[in-house]
Amino acid sequence: MRLDGSKIVEVGRWEDMKCDKVDDLGDVVLMPGLINAHCHLDYSGMRNAILSTSSFSQWVRRINELKRIISDDEYLEAIADGFQELRRWGTTSVFNIEAFPELMVRMPPPPIRTWWFYELLDIRNRIHTEDVVAGALGFFEHRPNWLGAFGLSPHAPYTTSLELYELCRICCEKYGMPLMTHLAETEEEFRMFAKGEGPLYDFLAPLGRNMSDTGKYTPLQHLVVNNALPQGAILTHMNELSEEDWVLLEKRKEDFSVVHCPNCHIYFQREFFDLERFLSIGVNLCLGTDSLASNRALNLFEEMRTVRELYPAISPEEIVRMVTVNPARAIGWAGRLGEIREGAVADLIAVPYDGGLSDVYAEIVQNETPIDWLKVQGKHVPLATGEPKAA
């Protein structure tokens, strides 16, 4: 390929190219950088801090305890460490949920392309439209040179009112921003909304949450029926769905993208995720890591390997699309990101490989070697220890 600054301007056979400066990487797969479609970099200092548990309410209590004793400096260090781990394993773009926007004034520009999703909750209070819009715009100001963009993340139906979801939808539609939310993540959440009962209901009711919106719909129906989501919303987890939900999702498959976090799913000991059904109905399916509070690594190669092990019928090529083409489509960058093609941004990685063409995708999925050569926006991004080695 031929690059001109931050863009790919030509792709073809070597003998057909005319390049003044040549960078020969040797025996590698040169491919688009990986895109992590769901991450919480704030919690990158919590690796192994919470034992694996099947109780989501118990996990929430523990992470809230940890959050109360972590300083801003520690959060900033954790975010920097998280970026380095992402880069080490070939991630050039990340969709990050930012729970502490006040940190942004002290944060340097991100080393990789980052979509910052401002996390919003109103478990006790209601927020007016003008406050949401002003807060969001204030969060996004004065960062014109940061790679990536900004979005909103109403946390989840159990912590965010329908009123705030609607305000987020209005803001995203008005300013062309993406929206991401956690949805249908646990059986406890499903019971709370579908039946008005269960551990999550019992945990939240004493905190002052208005429970009048429970006992009516499933979590997915709760948001869709009430027109709380903009077209293109990114729905993370989607583990607990009824048959009615599947029918609804198939009808609205062009309106949403879904993110699955395989090793986080295993950490919580959750029931089987019907990945093949999502693909069969045509949903745009992406992979993410979630956070190090519920995963052992920020490594999309590990996530791909887990999918390959659990779903052998899914082709390696389809799995690679879940960390390249599909999340680019989810964020509205189809054709510009996650592909090697003329006009796309030069976000690239080199994966060591000396085999034949027929095995390329399988070898990408099975890669266990850290990435030495990585470009974002056409520029090398070094590891923390210095410039990357020549491949």
Image (cartoon, rainbow, N blue to C red):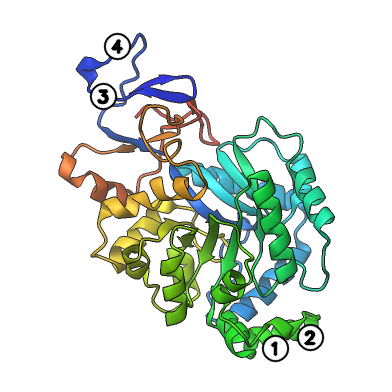
Residue in front for this viewpoint, 222 or 54: 222
- Which quadrant, please, contains the N terminus? top left
Residue drawn at the location 64% of the way across and 91% of the way down = 197
**Among the 4 quarters of the image, the one containing residue 292:** bottom right
Tag 1: amino acid: Asp
Residue drawn at the location 62% of the way across and 66% of the way down = 227
- Secondary structure at badge 4 equals loop
Horizontal and vertical percent for residue 54? 52, 80
Q: Residues within 10 Å of mark 3 (few under 14, many from 20)?
A: few
Q: Is residue 3 left or right of residue 76?
A: left
**Among the 4 quarters of the image, the one containing residue 141:** top right
Residue in front for this viewpoint, 369 or 22: 22
Horizontal and vertical percent for residue 379? 50, 26
Residue drawn at the location 20% of the way across and 36% of the way down = 354
Q: Residues within 10 Å of mark 4 (few under 14, many from 20)?
A: few
Question: Does residue 127 appear in the picture of this structure?
Answer: yes
- Secondary structure at badge 3 equals loop
> Are the two marked residues, 1 and 4, in contact with CB atoms closer than 8 angstroms?
no
Among the two numbered marks 3 and 1 on one chain, the one whose residue lies closer to the N terminus = 3
Q: Which numbered marker is on residue 18?
A: 4
Among the two numbered marks 4 and 3 on one chain, the one whose residue lies closer to the N terminus = 3
- Which quadrant, please, contains the C terminus? top left
According to the image, label 1 marks what residue? 202
Residue in front for this viewpoint, 178 or 1: 178
